[in-house]
Amino acid sequence: MGNLFKIALRNLLRYKRRTLLTASLITIGVVFVLVFVSVSGSFKNMMIGQITDSMLGHLQVHRKGFVASIETLPLNLNLKGGAIGRLEKILDAQPEIESYSPRVKFGGMFSNFTESSSIRLTAIDPVKEFRTVPLLPGRVTEGSRDLRPGGILIPELLARGMKVKPGDAVVIVATNADGSVNGKQFVVTGVMESATGPGGRDGYIHLDDARELLRMEDRQVSEYAIRLKAFGNLAAFDKRLDGLLAQELNQQGKPLFELHSWEKLSPFFNIARMIDVMTFFIKLMLIAIVLISIMNVMIMAVYERIREIGTIAAIGTLPGKILSMFVIEGFCMGVVGALIGDIVGISLVYILDALKISYDFGQQQGIILQVGVSAADILMISATVIIVSVIASLQPAFKASRMEPIQALRHI
């Protein structure tokens, strides 16, 4: 085998210009894919982080049927009493969970005493909520992030449209579960940017205020937002927790809870999937570049060395060794192209990261692009290049190994 490698390398060096051109094409392909995967992956992770860490959480648990009716924020589908205790007991027993936060969601009317507008409110326990969605406080652009009973965080849309600023008194009017209308005065604690776009109407109040405003006689929760210690374990934990919750039944013997990951709750998941599809097609382009480049070189090598192939076949070289010789040539070009491409690609990735390129995403301004490349991506791209190089060499190598020595020696 060692001799075959020596012969293959010697043959590649005999045609330096062609070998260099082919290796360069492979290198360019590897560099392009590595940089694209790094940048797109970083953007995707940032986008997911912005959505999950500023609003949704990694997972959410609701009473069965709540999500199907979420546009109306039905108070009659809140979790109550024993259901809350059963759920929290399950969540407390899961070591993968870093924190979870109970929420009450409802709609109401927002008034500054001269005009009114609709608002969607989420009542939270600030301590638990800020641990579960740590980027939420960062959305406050004016005023204080310290949400206490009697205070309200309002969206920028209402603050600008109704000329309300931190410290102003406002009134929230809401309809409770039995249909009665209630009102409560609040003081604007802060103004926050929307996580869903400039038209967002989501505000936040304290859980204690929601119980008073909605006249809840006992504890009620619309949803539990969950944050995991390791986001990469989301899929496996989602499946396991869903199995545990499915065992909890109501009085009618039907499932009491429903579990949803952020992917099922946010339309931004479609953007994440589109990024994955783009990455897949970029990788296909790399495969095409390598396949065409290697196959072209090997076909030319076989054509130019027909008499040489006939000579080594005539002196007794087995067809398998001839085939191996050409396959090893393709393998060597793949290895060299992948190795140089990895070095150049990783260097470019670190240069991009050092440049601290900034961009805007939705309402988030001046986000720094944090580019990185994982060892798994490097190994996967390199292995793909090498495997495709070997595959591309098979057809020309097979043709060379099947040549009749006499006919090959007659070739001019």
Image (cartoon, grey):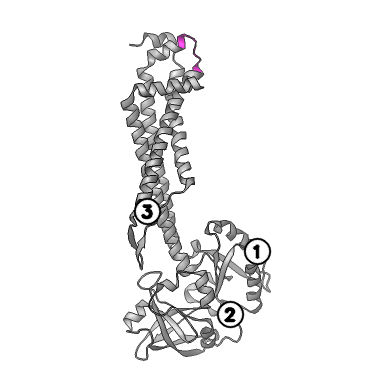
Please state which amino acid type lies under the numbered disc 2: Gln
- Judged from the image, the secondary structure of the residue bearing numbered disc 2 is strand
Instruction: Select label 3 or label 1 by which is in front.
Output: 3
Quarter-of-image position of residue 296:
top left
Rendered image: mark on residue 244: 1
Residue at 64% in and 79% down: 81
* Lateral position of residue 145 relative to residue 80, left or right: left
Q: Residues within 10 Å of mark 2 (few under 14, many from 20)?
A: many
Residue at 59% in and 65% down: 97
Q: Is residue 268 magenta?
A: no
Look at the image and tell me whether residue 176 can be seen: no
Please state which amino acid type lies under the numbered disc 3: Asp
Q: How far across and down, in percent of the image, does residue 357 sit?
A: 33, 57
Q: Residue furthest front?
A: 354
**Figure quadrant of the C terminus:** top left
Range drawn in magenta: 313-319
- Judged from the image, the secondary structure of the residue bearing numbered disc 1 is helix
Residue at 33% in and 54% down: 355
* Whether residue 118 is situated above or below residue 22 in the rendered picture: below
Instruction: Select label 2 or label 3 by which is in front.
Output: 3
Q: CA distance from mark 2 to mark 3?
A: 46 Å
Q: Are marks 3 and 1 in contact (CB under 8 Å)?
A: no
Please state which amino acid type lies under the numbered disc 1: Leu
Q: CA distance from mark 3 to mark 1?
A: 42 Å
Q: Are marks 2 and 3 in contact (CB under 8 Å)?
A: no
- Earlier sequence position, callout 3 versus callout 1: 1
- Earlier sequence position, callout 2 versus callout 3: 2
**Residue with the mark numbered 3:** 353
Quarter-of-image position of residue 201:
bottom left
Rendered image: mark on residue 58: none
Residue at 47% in and 90% down: 183
Rendered image: mark on residue 220: 2
